[in-house]
Image: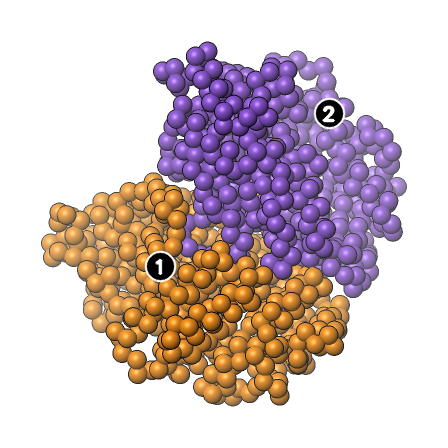
Chain colours: A orange, B purple
Amino acid sequence: MNQLQQPGHDHSSAYLIRRLQELLGPAGVITEASEQEPYLRDWLGKWHGKVSVVVRPANTEETAAVVQLCHATHTPIVTQGGNTGMSGGATPDDSGAQVILSTTRMNRIREVDPVNNTITVDAGVILAHAQEAARQAERYFPLSLGAEGSCTVGGNLATNAGGIAVLRFGNMRELALGLEVVLPDGRIWNGLRGLRKDNTGYDLRDLFIGSEGTLGVITGAVLKLFAQPHARATAWVGAASLQQLVSLLTRVRARCGERLVAFEMMSARSLELVLEHVSDTRAPLESKTAYNALIELSDTEDTGLQAMLEDVLGQALEEELISDAMFTSNQSQTAALWKIREGISQAQVRAGKAIKHDIALPISALPLFVAQAEQALADSGMTTDLINFGHLGDGNLHFNVLLPASTEYEAMKSATAAFNRLIHDLVINFNGSISAEHGVGQLRRDELKHYKSPLEMELMLRIKQAFDPNHIMNPGKLL
Amino acid sequence: MNQLQQPGHDHSSAYLIRRLQELLGPAGVITEASEQEPYLRDWLGKWHGKVSVVVRPANTEETAAVVQLCHATHTPIVTQGGNTGMSGGATPDDSGAQVILSTTRMNRIREVDPVNNTITVDAGVILAHAQEAARQAERYFPLSLGAEGSCTVGGNLATNAGGIAVLRFGNMRELALGLEVVLPDGRIWNGLRGLRKDNTGYDLRDLFIGSEGTLGVITGAVLKLFAQPHARATAWVGAASLQQLVSLLTRVRARCGERLVAFEMMSARSLELVLEHVSDTRAPLESKTAYNALIELSDTEDTGLQAMLEDVLGQALEEELISDAMFTSNQSQTAALWKIREGISQAQVRAGKAIKHDIALPISALPLFVAQAEQALADSGMTTDLINFGHLGDGNLHFNVLLPASTEYEAMKSATAAFNRLIHDLVINFNGSISAEHGVGQLRRDELKHYKSPLEMELMLRIKQAFDPNHIMNPGKLL
């Protein structure tokens, strides 16, 4: 490797910084260690790295200029949005050779078109701001997840984000119509088309979505909007088994169709953890059941939504498919249920150290998978405190294992490896996914290599080679 | 080019046929000219080609064996499903060097999973059979188009088919969860995952979808199913302008949300043509209006669907947004309206020769586009009989020009070139697509090269090179 390829080296690093300052001005270049610090670590505190410089281009053209320079100098680029990732995908390595390209200054809502039902945004727009811009135009942008107040649309696209409304509206891939991308050589691909039908060649858009910054820098997007929901009905149910919840899901879907927007599952242990660690929460039901679900319907107008939900759940109660149910009658009751569901992450942090899994399975396979996984965990002789919750309607479980907060780094590391192997082996047996919505990043890179077929890895590497032959886009992540 | 690369040549062709007969048995190999004939021409009678052999593998393994052999002998493959394409994408060239790989013997419904809401099928399954298998499991597969009785799921995937329910359910890309593909070297990629969330690397699936047989042979797919609709409300409206229909669409969408499954538009001339050329059709409204729309709502159960439609259209009538409306009160009335809409293709064939366009625009741009296109056609001095109809809810127009049936081949060819340039130039000005749902194939290959940015063409060619370096998959199509 020569000096040009090693910008961590004093000489080339100084050159790079001087050129970046010329291109972006002082506002676009951060060289002070203390100012760089927030960009160098992920919010979970799991990963930390070093860079020569953090750049914050103000627009697509500045981004293209930065990437051109990095292309010419073989400088690796780590693109970072709101830095809310769960898998270390936006944290640099510790070589000091990488550059962070932060999209956060690119935060314009470019256009809202309520007739075409689309919104066009810069990649650095915060998800909640995109939602708000849609709302102001009396439209609805449905992507919703815990970090929505700080994550960016670009990050959502790079990781093909999911969240709580995928069941109804799909993940980010299904919500995107067009993209603008700066390619690894600094050229700009304008794919900002707001069309529902466009069959003019290969689907470049969906190749960039979910590629975690390894094929280019997404700088803008056209996203789908929907009719605003004006009615909502929410319930909490308890069931004796996961199989019963899956049967209930099937029934609610057939009856309510696309009104069903959320079907969130929590094991008894997950609920208990929230009640213990998150203030102002109380059990929605008097009886304790093995599994709970938060079910929500929504509609553009109220044609008896609550009655429909009461009817379908009432019948399930009568047939003893579920053991209990409660319906909310105002917004604060609904908010209280969502607070429980959204409190699980926080409760885990307070209760100990979690080995997190982000798996997806065919919904029909979930009960058997969970039974076999629980059995395998019991057979393993490892102490397990299983926190099983997730988006049942998407077949997406966060099948986490909680360890005591006192667990040392090395013990955590070996436990993680052991649990990963046990759980991921089973996931693959059921034709599932070891990475459903949090991305691969650094966290699951080795797991991906372990489980993906050599053929699929080869195809991905061929695409990587075709787009980024110098491997400057987010090296060390995903592939 | 050596003999191996030219299987049209006697020696290598005889070798190829002998090997194929060994691999597939007599049922899988067609060498008789008369038996080959139906595979050699498209159903519109626009394209015709020659091959040394037509193969009909019975399953994925046989397909892989065929492709391996073609890979080894550098024999180009044209994959063909139901042969119902509109763009010549499945017709061989006239060199005799190509081989047709027909998927029609691969027609098994592999699995219906009503809990996971998925169906897994061979690529050669006829679309209507997939719909029927879903119905038998009390589920709904929404892709619907004119050729559904003979087109195959594999062809629908290869062309990312659209049709009449895209507005609500998306096109084939949004309906597919997993694929099985034989790659250009004969290896089988098993991507048959039935998952709603899966972020484990690049999106290979969507690269194959819409690639028109140029990257591999799709042999199987997992498709999404939905709740069965049990209620339907249909209306026909007349409006004085396209702008008024677009405003109505916006209003119906905001009010009815995802109940809206079809919003089909027809100009007065399109309607007139159907009434003239298709038997048992009559004008739905007494008054003649510049534009007509067929609007359909559906729902899993009837919570006042008809009343909702009457209300929203009644209000539009009151405000003079539309000039007239009729509602159907039974299935045969509804069928009569759909007969008009679906009769346009037939009416065009009977009335003359049509220069067909398959364009998409942002919905908000449609009225201005049509006004400018009509003006440009008038200014051009060319005689024009414009048949403007399409899927307004998707921004997809079939903006056709009808010429007398007597028009000679050369005159047709030059008129097509002239009209294409005029209309496609305008489409591109409005950031639209020159190929919305019928695919590029042979028909629009030169147009694609003319209009795509050199950068986008370059990226596509790099993908082609990465997947099919010998260029044996459907050469002469798409790219």
Q: Residues within 10 Å of mark 1 (few under 14, many from 20)?
A: some
State the CA–CA distance, disc 1 to disc 2: 57 Å
Q: Which mark, by number, is residue B349?
A: 2
Residue B441: horizontal and vertical position, in percent? Answer: 54, 29
Q: Identify the residue at the far left of this view.
A: A11
Q: Residues within 10 Å of mark 2 (few under 14, many from 20)?
A: some
* Residue A102 visible in this rendered orientation of the protein: no
In the rendered image, the quadrant that contains the N terminus of chain B is: top left
Residue A33: horizontal and vertical position, in percent? Answer: 20, 69
Q: Nearer the viewer, residue A106 or B209?
A: B209
Q: Nearer the viewer, residue B215 or A378?
A: A378
Residue B284: horizontal and vertical position, in percent? Answer: 85, 42
Q: Is residue A81 above or below residue B206?
A: below
Q: In which quadrant of the rendered view does residue A142 lie?
A: bottom right
Q: Which mark, by number, is residue B326?
A: none
Under circle 1, the secondary element is helix
**Amino acid on which the number 1 mark rests in the picture:** Glu
Q: Is residue A205 above or below residue A233?
A: above
Q: Which residue is at a point 46% across and 32% down the rendered structure image?
A: B65
Q: Identify the residue at the far top of this view.
A: B10
Is A32 on the left-hand or right-hand side of B174? left
Residue B394: horizontal and vertical position, in percent? Answer: 63, 46
Q: Which residue is at a point 81% across and 57% down the rendered structure image?
A: B306
Q: Which residue is at a point 53% across and 28% down the rendered structure image?
A: B24
Q: Nearer the viewer, residue B267 or A327?
A: A327
Q: Which mark, by number, is residue A447?
A: 1
Subunit under mark 2: B
Subunit under mark 1: A
Under circle 2, the secondary element is helix
Is A108 on the left-hand or right-hand side of B267? left
